[in-house]
Amino acid sequence: MKQTKTILIVLSLFWATSCADKQTKSDSQSTEKSSTKVDSIGDIRSDNVVHMPTDSIIDPMLVDGFGDLKIELDYKQVQSEYGIPDSLSKMEIWGADGEYHQTVYFTKMGIELDVIGDNEVKRTVNMITIKSPSKLRTKYGIGIGSHYEDVLRSYKASIDTESLTENSIVVGSIYGGLIFELKDKVVTLMFLGAAAE
């Protein structure tokens, strides 16, 4: 009887140690898994990517526009550089920010701008959309026709990995950043500004 109790105690200790060992291995593996991510392409990357806060503004050191076309650029400078736009939307006030907005289209150049301000003196560029046939590029040389891998390599430290897909790359955040839309791993559209409030 005494021997049976001893065997049961030894087995219990062995089982408890084994469970603790498995839990330690499981914790270790989950930590290991969380330190790497596999994106939709199958690339494995370290999870040391900087996740910018959702209320972040655009980092001017990272993205300062497309050539001379920048956020907060005076609209008069845009007109002197690009001339008369192909078309304009009606000016309207947005409830989100209380500003007057107008969309300005330079269709032949592949440029679409959201301009804010209630008079000619104070109007500035608020958001920029670049499409074909534009040849404008970011400060890292990314433009329409650039490849997925080139965008990842150029902006790897500031990509929002939570929203990363084959068709969309967000640098910074949708609340203030640079968004690349892609088709077949090729950039077809670039957007700079706040895509969401």
Image (cartoon, grey):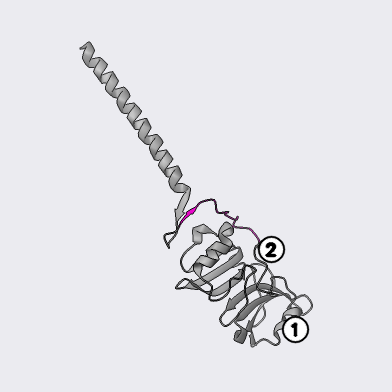
Task: Using the numbered discs, state the Cα–Cα distance from disc 2 to disc 1 in whole angstroms.
Answer: 23 Å
Q: Which mark is residue 29?
A: none
- Is residue 175 a member of the stretch shown in magenta? no
The three-letter amino acid code for the residue at tag 1 is Ser
Disc sitting over residue 60 in the figure: 2
**Quarter of the image containing the C terminus?**
bottom right
Density class for disc 1 (Cα within 10 Å; few <14, some 14-19, many ≥20) is few
- Pick out the residue farthest to the top: 2
Residue 173: in sight, yes or no?
no
Q: Position of residue 73 (x, y in %)?
A: 73, 73
Quick check: is 47 in the magenta stretch?
yes
x, y percent for residue 63: 65, 65
Q: Is residue 45 left or right of residue 130?
A: left
- Counting from the top left corner in percent of width and height, residue 150 is at 53, 67
Most common SS among magenta residues: loop
**Residue under the point 29% across and 20% down:** 10
Question: Which image quadrant is residue 111 in?
Answer: bottom right
Give the crowd class for mark 2: few <14, some 14-19, many >=20 residues within 10 Å: few
- Comparing 116 with 61, the one in front is 61
Label 2 is placed on what type of residue?
Pro
Label 1: which residue? 80
Q: Secondary structure at mark 1?
A: helix
SS for dot 2: loop
Image mark count = 2
Q: Residue at x 23, y 11 (%)?
A: 2
User: Is residue 130 among the parts visible in the rendering?
Assistant: yes
Image quarter of residue 29: top left
Position in image of residue 180 (x %, y %): 54, 69
Q: Nearer the viewer, residue 7 or 98?
A: 7
The reply to whether discs 2 and 1 touch (Cβ–Cβ < 8 Å) is no
Give the magenta range. Answer: 44-57
* Viewer-closest of 196 and 77: 77
